[in-house]
Image (cartoon, rainbow, N blue to C red):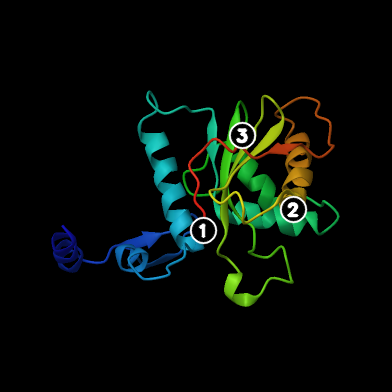
């Protein structure tokens, strides 16, 4: 099976990938994920999230339309804006309107937001360089229950104290953005709580 996969991988042309920000580049996805000690990068996350948005748009009768799928740039903007005294810049509100990312949707009427958040991307200046950008979590923003849900496969690697610190920018910015949008009526701008389920697949290594 491995030989068949290698033959297929070597026979097909490397596709071009246009990200949600309109950047086109060569995509050696299979080559990269087969590399020893490989780590997912922003481009891989964006490719996956864009694929979900594309299917959501194509299969409207099958996939829920009240779910918003964002990109990892959104989470980076959350962190940067949180460090600027909670100022919400125009780019964040462009997400709310659905103008970005590519094939994005307006948040009006949405029930859930999903995005990937890199814990060690730009938040912690004390992180050693070899660890930076290697720890992704899946984020669910439940707009009905007003809570954040964090899915992370390694329960031991990030303890509660550390995760509390990582989550502060997201907890702070989400209610502020929703309040500014005007789509959700009156909202308490206080930080939202988060929880991390433990009854999902996980591993012992990061």
Q: Which mark is residue 205?
A: 1
Asked if one can make out residue 20 in the rendered structure from this viewpoint, the answer is yes
Q: Which corner quadrant of the image does residue 107 belong to?
A: top right
Quick one: 184 or 44, which is closer to the camera?
44
Q: Which corner quadrant of the image does residue 134 belong to?
A: bottom right
Q: Residue at x 32, y 67 (%)?
A: 28
Which percent across, then down, holds residue 194?
71, 38
State the separation of the CA atoms marked 1 and 3.
36 Å
Secondary-structure class at tag 1: loop
Q: Earlier in the sequence, mark 1 or mark 3?
A: 3
Within 10 angstroms of label 2, few (less than 14), some, or many (20 or more) residues?
A: some
Q: Earlier in the sequence, mark 2 or mark 3?
A: 2
Task: Mark 2 and mark 3 in contact? Answer it, CB < 8 Å.
Answer: no
Q: Which residue corresponds to mark 3?
A: 107
* Mark 1 vs mark 2: in front: 1
200 up-or-down from 88: above or below: above
Q: Which quarter of the figure is the N terminus placed in?
A: bottom left
State the separation of the CA atoms marked 2 and 3.
17 Å
Residue 111 horizontal side relative to residue 19, left or right: right
Asked if one can make out residue 19 in the rendered structure from this viewpoint, the answer is no
118 up-or-down from 145: above or below: below
Q: Which residue corresponds to mark 2?
A: 89
Secondary-structure class at tag 2: loop
Residue 101 horizontal side relative to residue 61, left or right: right
Quick one: 104 or 190, which is closer to the camera?
190
């Amino acid at each position: 099976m491995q030989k068949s996969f290698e033959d297929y991988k070597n026979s097909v042309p490397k596709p071009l990938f246009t990200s949600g920000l309109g950047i086109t580049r060569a995509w050696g996805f299979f080559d990269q994920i087969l590399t020893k000690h490989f780590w997912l990068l922003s481009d891989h996350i964006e490719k996956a999230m864009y694929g979900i948005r594309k299917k959501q748009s194509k299969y409207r009768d099958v996939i829920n339309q009240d779910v918003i799928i964002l990109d990892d740039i959104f989470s980076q903007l959350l962190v940067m804006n949180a460090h600027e005294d909670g100022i919400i810049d125009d780019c964040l509100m462009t997400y709310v309107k659905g103008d970005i990312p590519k094939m994005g949707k307006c948040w009006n009427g949405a029930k859930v937001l999903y995005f990937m958040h890199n814990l060690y991307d730009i938040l912690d200046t004390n992180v050693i360089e070899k660890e930076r950008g290697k720890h992704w979590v899946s984020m669910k923003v439940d707009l009905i229950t007003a809570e954040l849900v964090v899915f992370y496969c390694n329960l031991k690697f990030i303890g509660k104290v550390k995760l509390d610190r990582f989550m502060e920018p997201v907890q702070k910015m989400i209610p502020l953005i929703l309040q500014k949008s005007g789509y959700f009526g009156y909202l308490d701008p206080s930080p939202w709580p988060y929880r991390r389920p433990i009854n999902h697949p996980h591993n012992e290594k990061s």
